Image (cartoon, helix red, strand yellow):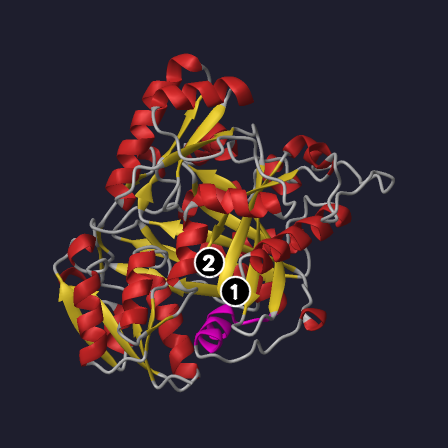
Amino acid sequence: MFKRIMIANRGEIAMRILRCCREMGIESVVIYSEEDADSLPVQFATESVCIGPAGAAESYMNQEAILAAAVAYHCEAIHPGYGFLSENETFAAKCEQNGIVFIGPSSRLIRKLGNKQEARSTVKKHGVPVVPGSEGILRSWQEARDVAAKVGYPVLIKASSGGGGRGMRRAYDESEIRRAFEEAQAEALAAFGDGALYLEKLILNPRHIEVQILADKNGHVVQLGERDCTLQRRNQKLLEEAPARILTPRQRESIHRAALKVAKAVNYESAGTVEFVLDKSSADQTADSGKEKNRFGFDKDRDRKNGFYFIEMNTRVQVEHPVTEMVTGVDIIKEQIRIAAGQDLSIQQRNIRSEGHAIECRINAEDPKRNFAPNPGKISFVHFPSGNGVRVESAIFSGCRISPYYDSMIGKIIVHAGTRLEAIRKMRMALSEMTVEGVDTNVDFLYLLMFNVDYMTGNVDTGFLEKNASAIMRWDEESRK
């Protein structure tokens, strides 16, 4: 096992990894920018090192400076967390070249799966359903127009590299295709340094379902069940649940099997997430066992039968990994570190059980009344909820400053209970206790969401928040009259 790990991230995920290292008896070296000099990870790490000024490009994404610090501080491995360099194949390759373990998959796997068009082609060969779309990288907006004409509108133009909802644009007819292509390309270039795009048929009103995978270097692969990440705003997840109650038993079995096939097809190693869209119109359909199967075990009429399509595989730990930990009892970060150190998984598929229901709400420093505009500033006071089945992941404290240079997420509240309704009630309690003074947050909005009838009954899709945010906020305004 490693003696010392560098944590190349900030905020709540840096604290999550740091705590895991302390639990495992591993020393931690946290990098930080000048902006984060007083941050909680810096205060709790074994050692810390300033890596550059506030801008992420000069600090948390400064590959040469991070590697030089890792060597100088005798770190055997680097944990990138999520975001920043977590899915950067060049950084992973440089770690390999410098004899430092990148806690994640190899640079080869990141390249293979990070190129979303190549990933689509790979999983399609193994019989996993994919959304109809382009067969390769689009060379021009005119080519995008031609492909869209074949698959039918609406379509989604997506960056081949990166993730997090960036480099994505919708086009509902031919008049919108050029603008969508050019905007997606510009955003992809700015965010990932790669303007390569591909096109998919846009599945209207889908559910977003993902499956957590763990795979060690000796070929052992397990799935830890699925998460429902349907509630999103501007392609950014806001609330996640495990398990996905919308799935029928047959759909659950099929989607788990598909995720395992994806991981095994590429000889995956580390923690990873296989993401799917679920056609909402098929979500309540029951399986017809008389349908003919293809040679991979999936129904030939799979687009209507199973109702799900592969969209991508994320080669890192996800923001929402705690909900899976809550229902399975598996420490995903710990397993990820064990895998990187060459150890076998400590769990086997037959021993994994999903118990109860978990919900995670992302707490953001933003003002819902101003279209969720980021709201950086100084937190004068903070109080976190607690109690049986309540977990908080955060790096904020009274007197800390929320920086305008980074993502607005300042924490996560996760609850676990025996049933989904009990979990919703527990989340209401937790959100009502959560107090942040000095900056605006989305806590009140999330609290109101917990009472929305459509959310409570599961009648939601990925466009739900865009369509209903204003109505939910009106409840708050009316309650204050």
Q: Is residue 160 above or below residue 92?
A: above
Q: How many marks?
A: 2
| Image side of residue 65 versus residue 335, left or right | left
Residue 67 lies in quadrant? bottom left
The secondary structure type at the circle numbered 2 is strand
- Residue receiving disc 2: 413
Task: Find disc 1 in the rendering and name its residue.
Answer: 390
Cα gap from disc 2 to disc 1, whole angstroms: 7 Å
What's the mark number on residue 130? none
Which image quarter: residue 68? bottom left
Q: Position of residue 113 (x, y in %)?
A: 45, 51
Magenta: main secondary structure equals helix
Q: Is residue 459 magenta?
A: no
- Frontmost residue, 396 versus 315: 315
Quick one: SS at disc 1?
Answer: strand
User: Is the C terminus in the top left, top right, bottom left or bottom right quadrant?
Assistant: top left
Residue for point 71% across, 37% down: 302
Q: Left or right: where does residue 3 sit relative to residue 455?
A: left
Residue 337 falls inside the magenta stretch: yes
Q: In percent of the image, x 34 and y 19: which residue is there? A: 178
The structure residue drawn at horizontal position 76% and vertical position 49%, both measured from the top left corner, is 249
Q: Is residue 37 visible?
A: no
Looking at the rendering, the stretch of residues picked out in magenta corresponds to: 329-340
